[in-house]
Amino acid sequence: MTKAPSNSTLSDVAREANVSVSTASRVLNGLAEKYRISQSTAQLVRESAEKLDFRPSQVARSLRLKRTGLLGIVVPDLSNTFFSSIARAVTISAEADGFSAILADSGGSVEKEKQLIDQLVDRSVEALVVCPIGLSFEHLERVHHHGTPLVLVDRCKACSEMVQVTSDHIAGTLLAMKLLLENGHRHIGVLQGIAGTLPCDQRLLGVQEALAEVDIEFDSAMVAGDQFTYESGYRSARQLLTTHPEITALFAMSTPNAFGAYQAAVELGLRVPDDISLVCFDDVAFADFMQVPLTTISQDVPELGRLAATLVTQQLLSGEVPSQKLHKLPVTLLTRASVGKVPPS
Amino acid sequence: MTKAPSNSTLSDVAREANVSVSTASRVLNGLAEKYRISQSTAQLVRESAEKLDFRPSQVARSLRLKRTGLLGIVVPDLSNTFFSSIARAVTISAEADGFSAILADSGGSVEKEKQLIDQLVDRSVEALVVCPIGLSFEHLERVHHHGTPLVLVDRCKACSEMVQVTSDHIAGTLLAMKLLLENGHRHIGVLQGIAGTLPCDQRLLGVQEALAEVDIEFDSAMVAGDQFTYESGYRSARQLLTTHPEITALFAMSTPNAFGAYQAAVELGLRVPDDISLVCFDDVAFADFMQVPLTTISQDVPELGRLAATLVTQQLLSGEVPSQKLHKLPVTLLTRASVGKVPPS
DNA sequence: ATGAAAGCGCTAACAT
DNA sequence: ATGTTAGCGCTTTCAT
């Protein structure tokens, strides 16, 4: 193997061009005319740099300038398209603003999340975009108070000074609930994700509000589940459908939840949407190719990431925390086949 | 906003403890006993560090040690689960080995890929895992010769000294073709991805080999497509199915290709699998919930990423390029509903 | 058992 | 129009 030809440094270039490092630095940073460096010297420096294939050390620059050009992203699960889509948007947006993104996967553990954030801060990332687990925020508040630009995405914290980006969960839920109610459904089961997280809580509020509007009493026994996963959806749907046979519709808080529910329905001999209607939050790729295309409340996921990245880089440039803390993005209802009229009892 | 309490440095700790920076450094790096530093001094240093909430600057360490602990990952499209799954595996594996991963999305452009790799090298990443576009490798060969540990994933280069990880495309294709042939199919259309890339070429070879075994002449007119995308699959399937009505089965090189083909079939009034059978490379999430669950050749995608990360970190630790250059991972055929007996003509 | 000092590669204030 | 020098925060050789 050819060994690395130990990279040339600025002083190598300076020596090659017979100038001082400062002159070399100035020329290569485009400050030649500001410092009125002669055309010939400038040219010479550029040629030397070219000849030695000089690549300035970003590490050294970072140390000197106290600017790393790094941005940290932390998500709970990169194998979930919701989060990989956010990660992609952040990465690309950051890249466009001259930043590189360090990506970390917390695997759904708060402990890991803390640890990863500390690591990123130690690496002097200039800003952080975090999709938190959503149940504990002290470590994030600490980062925020420390002054590092930070934006939270999705699982936000109610009543916080931190900058946050999420969807309008209540409005989305109202859309879905309205559709179910219009179709005559009166017994609606709710498959929730991680209780206590803002998306979960807000959607629950939406359910209650929608029911209140048509004078149906909310019954917490109609709510089950504890994760945004397939398994949680499966278990909770099975439980609700067996203990509450009067249920004619299910509102699932995530696509995996909905798929779990679908499987449970199938196993219980219930057809969707004939026997049981199904709506869920978050969209599915290739929904139209499903056995029963799901009616979904679709979030603008890439925009969630793009906005977060923009907010954080803006803050970096302006030096000011954006005055608007909470950014709620609109959602849309995509009506497909999984919701039908309530079956005759 | 509380401004950042400018982080304390090693010399702050040293001052606080009334020792020299060298002593402080030694203690905090666990070299106290190697240097026979007194218990009391060591304790004092540790307390001072604690008190000042000292966090060593990784940037400064990187400069001094010439080790950044950074690993770069480049993929063509993070919104494709195939690549996000690889990215996840690499990230997690790197993390476990004490590295942080900088993630970049080339958006399918070789130019961007080059640029991103240069950027990563400038940032002194210690190693690179790249899922290249797969048509041009000079920039990658350069990195390799430069001595930076590099592993290519998926779209490898045939006959190269670079370390590469990919699936056994030929074996996978043979499995799929065998299934089609066993079901009586004799006119098989091929929906290819980016021609010229190794996965595409190898799969084409597999098709030819399978046909040769049963004495069917390979006809290049039965091959269409130019991307691994839905659109390419749609267009090429439509074209093949209309110009070659004798076709009874399609072999698609990616899931998006297959979905596009499915859509084309539907539009042409062809039922899957009754009129037309369909197999594809790469698995689909929730395949069982599809209208017609796809028979797929499933790659162990996370293992692709994990192995790549391992190879690269091994190389970093051992200082030697692994002797085995090409790593071919086995694939499995997942038989589902999209393949059926050839229809009576 | 501890400290002084050099230096990683770069930028920028301060000389000329 | 260009050079000298200090210093970013750290590790490590060489003294003592």
Image (tube, coloured by chain):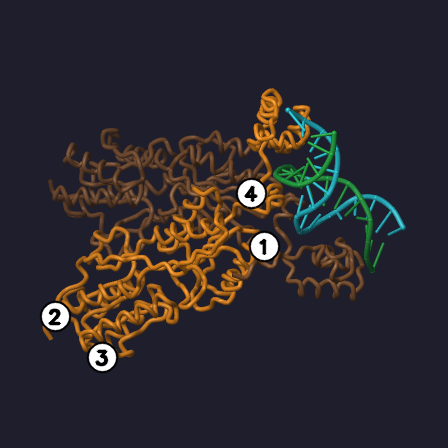
Chain colours: A orange, B brown, C green, D cyan
**Badge 3 element:** loop
Q: Chain of mark 2?
A: A
**Residue A79 image-quadrant placement:** bottom left
The answer to whether residue B63 is left or right of residue A183 is: right
Q: Tell me the CA gap for discs 2 and 4.
A: 61 Å
Q: Tell me the CA gap for discs 1 and 4.
A: 16 Å
Q: In the image, what residue type sits under mark 2?
A: Pro
Query: Nearer the viewer's eye, disc 1 or disc 4?
Result: 1
Q: Tell me the CA gap for discs 3 and 4.
A: 59 Å
Q: Which mark is residue A343?
A: 2
Labels 3 and 2: the sequence-earlier one: 3
Q: How many marks?
A: 4
Q: Is residue B328 visible?
A: no
Residue identified by numbered label 4: B125
Q: Which mark is residue B178?
A: none
Q: In the image, what residue type sits under mark 1?
A: Asp
**Residue B133 image-quadrant placement:** top left
Label 3 neighbour load within 10 Å: few <14, some 14-19, many 20+: few
**Badge 2 element:** loop
**Badge 1 element:** helix
Q: Mark 1–mark 3 contact, CB under 8 Å?
A: no
